[in-house]
Structure formats: structure tokens, C-alpha cells
Amino acid sequence: MKYISYINELFRNEINKTESFVLYGQNVSTGSCLSGLTRDFQKIKGCNIFNTPNTENALVGMGFGLMLGGISSSFFMKQQDFLLLGIDHLRNTNNFIRQQAPSASFTIVNITMDAGYEGIQASLNNLSDFCAIAGCEGYTISSRQDADLIIKKHFVKPGFRIISISQRFFNTEILDLKYRSSQKDNLIIKCMQGRDVTVACFNFSLPQGKQLCDELNQIGITSSLFSITAAHPVTYRSILKDAKKTGSLVIIDDSKCHISTSNLLEIEALRSGISKVCIFKRFITEDSYRPISDVFNVSIKDVVQQLNLP
């Protein structure tokens, strides 16, 4: 199944279980319905759906207001960049509401424009920046397992969070890794078990991590693969435990950010005595602000050389 079709189905199922749910955003029930993300939501019984103007600051505030009134809602938005217009509510209104212990849910679901061809609108793909400002939960979805755990567990849970999905995955088959285990308190998912290398993937870099593990396996090197879906700082104990066994850690992070949550794993790994650490991150250049194919490759040759693998 396509990535966008699977996520659409999960959202519809969860909304269908919730009474008097409010869903709103620009063109959520007209046109392409956010490229298929919100298609057929208006058919859900008990879902009140509203197409809104482009007033992101007011729309973020609206969700917090509904939550204060005991009504669960979700703001579905096309571009993560425009969430910058709601920063005041994300920080200050959220700080006020969290003191009230709300019983309702408010979730912002945004599309990360990460294909690259959108130019300046594709230059911001790091959800953890918003989570750091707002002090809130945030999750990225790269695989079927990510989608299952995040949407089923967090989408309509009381409180506030942000869920981000990747535009470049929309028309691809959803990645299905049949995960082995998950660190459920912060949604670190272990997808594969190996004895030689530990691979940890941040933001939307899981496909690159999976490809690296497959290439390493072809030369007789087996890998453990982890998907870090939480965009806010988390406890990396399961990754560190595995890396101590393998003796080698590869960190992959495709976020366009000078400092991200992956830096915390790097620091914790060094503190834990894991000396063989290889890091693949983006470098922000002027090309990041121009329409250009957004390619992020991980070199198996560099991994083997830097980790001194056989």
C-alpha cells in the first residue's frame, strides 16, 4: 500500500472511534484534500470538518481553545514551514493550557515539504525545532510500524502534540520492516537485529538506514536498525545497550538543522564508552533554499572505513 493511503486509513479509523471530533485546515475536504492525506474524512460519522483560510496563527489558537472547552480536534496543514506563524500559541498558550490538565486532545498534523523542489519552503524539515520551542511531543512517520504506533497511541490522546509526515514518501510503497521491539515510552523502534553494527535513524532517514543495512549484509556485516520517531529529546538506552554489544554506532539524520536531537545520542554514546561512531548529517548550504532534488545518500564505503569494519 502507498504511504499516504495507509496513513489516511489509520487517521480515519482513529477519528471514527472519537465522538464529536473537529478536523480543520485549508482544503481538507476539497480539491486534492492535501494530496490525499484527508481524503474522505468528511464521510466519517461524528467528524465535524471545516475548510479554513490561510490564518495559521489563529488556527493553532483555535485548536487550543477547543481543547480548553473539552473538544478534541486536529489541525491538518499542508506545509510545516507555516507552523512558524503559530509560534506564540505553540509556546505561550500551550504553557498555560498544560497547567489545566486538559481532558481533550489537540494534534497538529503537518506535511514536511522535503522533496526539495519547493525551494525555500523545503528548507525546514526538522520537527524537533518546533518541539524544542513548544516543549511538546512530536513524532515523524517513516514506516508502517511508525504509523501504527504513533497514530493509534498518540493522535487522540489527551493533551497536545505534533505529527509530521514526509511529502517525498507520499507515492512510494510504505516501508514495512516488521519491527522486533519498541521502547514504548518514547517510541524508539527496533526494526532489525545484528551483531556487528548499530544503525540509528532520525527524522525521515529510515529508508537510508534500511538500505545501508542491506548493503552491509551483502558483505557479511549484520546490523541492528533503530527508528527514532520521537522528535523531542528521548532516552536512548535501548540503542546504547545494542551499540555496546556491536561496538559500532552509525547515526543517520536527514534534518536540515545545525543542532538536532541526534547530537544528544552522539554525546551519550561517547559518554558510554562507544568509541566507534559514524555520523551522516546534512550540511546546510545555499542550495538548501533553491528548488533542487533533495538527495541524501549514506555511503557504505565511508561506514566501513570510519568504523574499521572487516
Image (cartoon, helix red, strand yellow):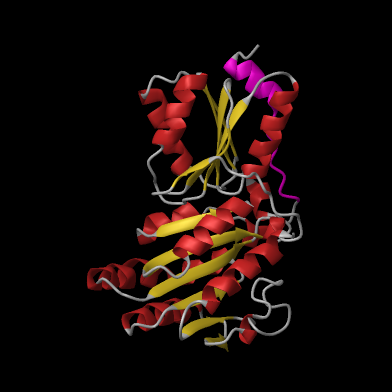
Q: Quadrant of residue 298?
A: top right
Residue 101, x across and y down, in percent: 26, 71
Q: Quadrant of residue 100?
A: bottom left
Residue 76, x across and y down, in percent: 56, 74
The residue depicted at 76 percent of the width and 55 percent of the height is: 172
The residue depicted at 61 percent of the width and 27 percent of the height is: 223
Q: Quadrant of residue 261?
A: top left
Residue 71, x across and y down, in percent: 39, 83
Above or below, 67 against 281 in this view is below
Q: Is residue 200 visible?
A: yes
Q: Is residue 124 visible?
A: no
- Residue 270 lies within the magenta run: no
**Image quadrant where one finds the N terminus:** bottom right
Left or right: 235 with respect to 198? left
Above or below, 213 against 294 in this view is above
The residue depicted at 47 percent of the width and 27 percent of the height is: 242
Identify which residue, 238 or 202, lies in the foreground.
238
Above or below, 126 against 278 in this view is below
Give the magenta part as a residue range: 293-307
The residue depicted at 41 percent of the width and 68 percent of the height is: 157
Identify which residue, 13 or 101, lies in the foreground.
13
**Image quadrant where one finds the C terminus:** top right
